[in-house]
Image: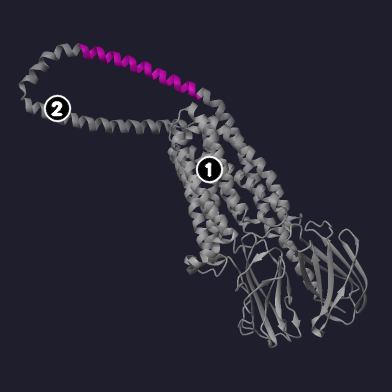
Amino acid sequence: MTQTIAPRVRTLVLLLLAAACALLAGAGPASAHAALTGSDPREGAVVDKAPAQVSLTFSESVSMDDDSLRVLDPKGKRVDDGKPSGTGGTTYSVKLHAGLPDGTYTVTYQVVSADSHPVSGAYTFSVGAPSETSVTVSGQGAGGGFVGGLYGVGRYVSYAGFAVLVGGAAFVLACWPRGSGVRVVQRFVVSGWLSVTAATLLLLLLRGSYTGSGKVADVFDLGLLGEVLQTKAGAALVSRLLLLAAAALFIAVLFGAYDKREDEERRDLTFGLAVGGSVVAVGLAATWAMSEHASVGLQAGLAMPVDVVHLIAVATWLGGLTALLVALYRGPADTPVPALAVSRFSRVAFGSVIALVVTGTYQSWRQLGSWTAFTDTRYGQLLLVKIGLVAVLVGVAYFSRRWTAQLAEATPAVARAAAARRAEKGEKGAGKASGNASAKAGAKAGTKASGNAKVAAKESGTAKGSGTAKGAGGSQRAAQLARQRAAVDAARQKRQRDADPNRFGLRRSVLAEAGIAVVLLVVTTVLTQTEPGRTEEEAKAAGTSSAGSSAPATGAVTLDMPFDTGSQNGKGVVRVELDPARVGVNDLHLYVERSDGTAFDIPEVKVALTQKAKDIGPLPVAPDHITTGHWSASGVQIPMAGDWEVAVTVRTSDIDQVTISKNTQIG
């Protein structure tokens, strides 16, 4: 039976690895949390004269260098001063050269969002009239290419290694303490540590090129590596390496002093290892939480500890499941996994699933924000796939629990039968030994004289040499026979173990669980690189609003403008409604809301209208506060039709304020 199982295991492992590679290869460049929500000049705009600067507004704060924001003329020559400056928490601008001629200009940007992912893109605007341009806008992307693919593989290996390390150690401590002395379990946990350590070093080297040029040669640029160490992502990777050093000490104790202790002494050491291992595991999980989606956006202070719990629950469940699989298939025949250990893991896995459901529900709400985001965004679609895989995994785990219960019931009967067979074998062996002893005693008396005569007739030296040679040959033969008997006994024990239908059924169900877990981990890794649904929908809404504002207005105009002053409560959305958006008298309403749609008040808000083409304005508007989050102004005079810029200054504290703007056509 074992001979038929092993090829199936190898085949399934190869298929799972192929599926993992296919999913990772199809992931494409990493999308990020930050998204471009506004620009000045806006995309596709045609302005009468060249602007003095180009401004970009993102959905969250981003980091820039001198080459992050570039403006190219129709021939591809750079026409900006190369020194982007921030005018707010999310708005950045770069000054342009004076006297730019008419034509189409291309704006390119490549920045790093607050959750460590690269963001890039490009768009065009025209001065005077559109013209031909040699600059290619398509294909602009960050985090792609060979370096991006290698970075994605490194991320997957680091997650998988973390799950193996934490889950394997938890399986030994909480479920099977005697497993600390099993060689395959030791190798399994150590392989997890080696994997996450190697992947972390690889990510640290690739980070600069991944968020920058994408060139392989930049991987070995020490100057670029020094810049990476000063970023949040670099600090997280270095912290992970330091914590992995502490994890190495934990592994040495677990498979060294802990394994050599007796059961009574081992209980005392278990508590210390559990506390120390938990601290290291939480620290390792925090290195992901502090540099990924949880560290930015809505309720970051709550989202990061929730993310830590989520990661540890995943590792405990999937890593422990894989450790159980390895022990069931590759463990020694004389040290099978006891039913009690499987029952304990079943309870641990159930608790992990409960933690996953609770934390996953919160993360889904935080990253999506609406039911439509499940189907309308890539993040939501991937999340639906993940939920489906978890549901299937829980269903398979149900059958594993049934096999576990049957195995626990069958274990006492099997043990009694084995003990009876050993006792019967011992009685037969004792009778046989007694008979042989009697026969030998009788024969010994009859042959003693003959034996003595033969010994005396031989020469002393010949007898001694012959005895030495015979003794050496007999010793080698005995050792060979002992090895053969041990191999035969091990094969027999393994056949007996595998013949147990309950254990065989458990092995098959655990193998199925592990297979689904591999794909689940791939989907989770891709999710961490995908732009959250909430952000994607905000970017779409901003794009729709911008597109709508570029058409001639025939009625009321509504402009939604996200803002972030950088203070604790300084992030939200300003909605400006101008009615009827025509020349003459207009009514203006202004609403301030948080990201979740809740209205709130701020100390001050101001509006200014400017038509740059005719050099009119800014025309100040001082709206009156009506109610919570609502300001209004009547009798707003707009002297002529055209493309007007609506600028709103938001102040959320005595020192924190930002000015945001959008253009709209007023007829």
Which residue is label 1 attached to? 322
Left or right of residue 232: residue 265: left
Q: Nearer the viewer, residue 376 or 399?
A: 376
Above/below status of 401 relative to 589: above
Pinpoint residue 133: horizontal percent, then vertical percent: 64, 84
- Please provide the residue range marked out in magenta: 414-441
Pinpoint residue 117: horizontal percent, then vertical percent: 62, 62
Q: Residues within 10 Å of mark 2 (few under 14, many from 20)?
A: few
Above/below status of 323 relative to 525: above
Which residue is label 2 attached to? 467
Labels 2 & 1 near each other (Cβ < 8 A): no
Quadrant of image for the N terminus: top left
Q: Nearer the viewer, residue 408 or 276?
A: 276
Residue 420 among those drawn in magenta: yes
Identity of the residue drawn at 21% across and 29% down? 474
Q: Name the quadrant containing residue 538.
A: bottom right
Sequence order check: which comes first, mark 2 or mark 1? 1
Left or right of residue 441: residue 534: right
Q: Main secondary structure of the magenta part?
A: helix
Residue type pointed to by label 1: Thr
Residue 433 among those drawn in magenta: yes
Secondary structure under tag 1 reads helix
Identity of the residue drawn at 71% across and 55% down? 367
Identity of the residue drawn at 67% across and 49% down? 387
Pinpoint residue 505: horizontal percent, then vertical percent: 54, 36
Residue type pointed to by label 2: Gly
Q: Name the quadrant containing residue 314.
A: top right
Q: Residues within 10 Å of mark 1 (few under 14, many from 20)?
A: many
Between the C-alphas of marks 2 and 1, the distance is 55 Å
Pinpoint residue 59: horizontal percent, then vertical percent: 71, 64
